[in-house]
Amino acid sequence: MDKIGKVAVLIKQVPATESVKIDPKTGVMMREGLAVEVNPLDLHAIEEAVRLKESLGVHVTAVTMGPPAAEKAARFAVAMGCDEGVVVSDRAFAGSDTLATSTVLAGALRKLGPFDLALAGERATDGETGQVGPAVAALLDFSVLTYVSKLEPRQGQVAFERAIEGGHERLLAPLPALAVVVKEINVPRLCTLAGKLRGKKAEIRNLSAADLGLPAERLGLAGSPTKVVRVDYPQVVRKGRKISAAENFDDAVLALEKFLKNIGLEGV
Ligand SMILES: Cc1cc2nc3c(=O)[nH]c(=O)nc-3n(C[C@H](O)[C@H](O)[C@H](O)COP(=O)(O)OP(=O)(O)OC[C@H]3O[C@@H](n4cnc5c(N)ncnc54)[C@H](O)[C@@H]3O)c2cc1C
């Protein structure tokens, strides 16, 4: 491969909240009615892809798997500068675990490619497994680059830096490759007004299960070996004793001081 031409960015639409509830019966996340946004860590993947477009003239395709409403995420990626946005959506994908999700995304990249490079965020703020990027790379037989904090495609190769404890590793890998980027790699740009208009008008392509030609047993619940058998919420029980009914701060401090003195902890 002489020159890098096509780049894919994987983006996930996530609830715009940290407090996602899990259905205690099915173990599946309850997403209905929640405001959504592009996974914040994926903005760094989009930014890096758009920078490659600006410096090397590559063509950037943003791909998201989700419900039809994930189209909004695809439009956002175009507004940030991606050339096109694709939504991979089908009822057959419902109940997908990370393997089934990665199978679908790898199928989409096969269909839309060939790509020289794919980019993904470090993890999604809802599922938080961090498995999808490396799994897609493995399914496509791409080089797997993780914790990438700097990226520089060369002829047939990609030079990259990897964040490790206490420093960075500098490495070279053959293309095609999938890089999972960390947030230190760049500062995502804000969408311009012109970008927002481009995103709004963009034709968003849809891919269904039939388009991917994957066997039904690899999709959705059937293709998901992970089973949520039980969901437990840890009970936070603090055994405590109220040592003062004081209504003002000074009296409360005096009561605490007296209490600590009585149990021999004065001056600790
Ligand atoms: C048994 C089971 C059933 C489930 N059922 C459902 C369900 O019915 N509906 C549902 O929505 N979720 C369901 N999930 C959750 C779903 O599997 C995960 O949300 C999904 O696999 C992504 O995993 P993650 O959130 O940990 O992503 P991570 O691996 O943390 O994501 C890392 C990166 O991969 C990319 N990425 C991840 N997901 C996508 C995506 N969808 N599209 C594009 N890029 C992506 C992004 O770049 C992201 O930053 C289920 C999970 C299990 C275990």
Image: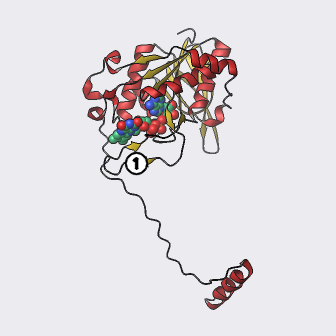
Residue topped by disc 1: 22
Name which quarter of the figure residue 95 lies in: top left
Q: Indicate the position of residue 10 as horizontal and vertical percent values.
A: 50, 26
Ligand 1 falls in quadrant: top left
Toward the right, the furthest residue is 250
Residue at the extreme top of the image, as rendered: 2
Question: In screen coordinates, is 55 left or right of 1?
Answer: right
In the image, is 4 to the left or to the right of 141?
right
Image quarter of residue 158: top right
Q: Residue furthest front?
A: 33
Crowding at dot 1, Cα within 10 Å, few <14 / some 14-19 / many 20+, comes out as some
Camera-nearest residue between 250 and 187:
250
Q: Where residue 240 appears, x then y in whole percent? A: 53, 78
Classify residue 212 by image quadrant. Answer: top left
Please, is residue 12 above or below residue 154 in the view?
A: below
- Residue at 26% over, 33% down: 222
249 or 82: nearer the viewer: 249
Secondary structure under tag 1 reads: strand
Q: Amino acid at mark 1?
A: Ile
Where residue 19 sits: x, y (%)? 50, 49
268 above or below 153?
A: below
Of 71 and 51, nearer the camera is 71
Tell me: residue 236, above or below residue 147.
Answer: below
Q: Residue at x 57, y 35 (%)?
A: 41
**Is residue 268 something that shows in the picture?**
no
Q: Residue at x 29, y 28 (%)?
A: 218
Q: Is residue 92 visible?
A: yes
Does residue 254 sit above or below 107 in this rendering?
A: below
Q: How is the image coloured?
A: secondary structure
Query: As drawn, is 84 to the left or to the right of 21?
Result: right
Quarter of the picture holding the C terminus: bottom right
Q: Going 36% across and 53% down the picture, which residue do you hit?
A: 231
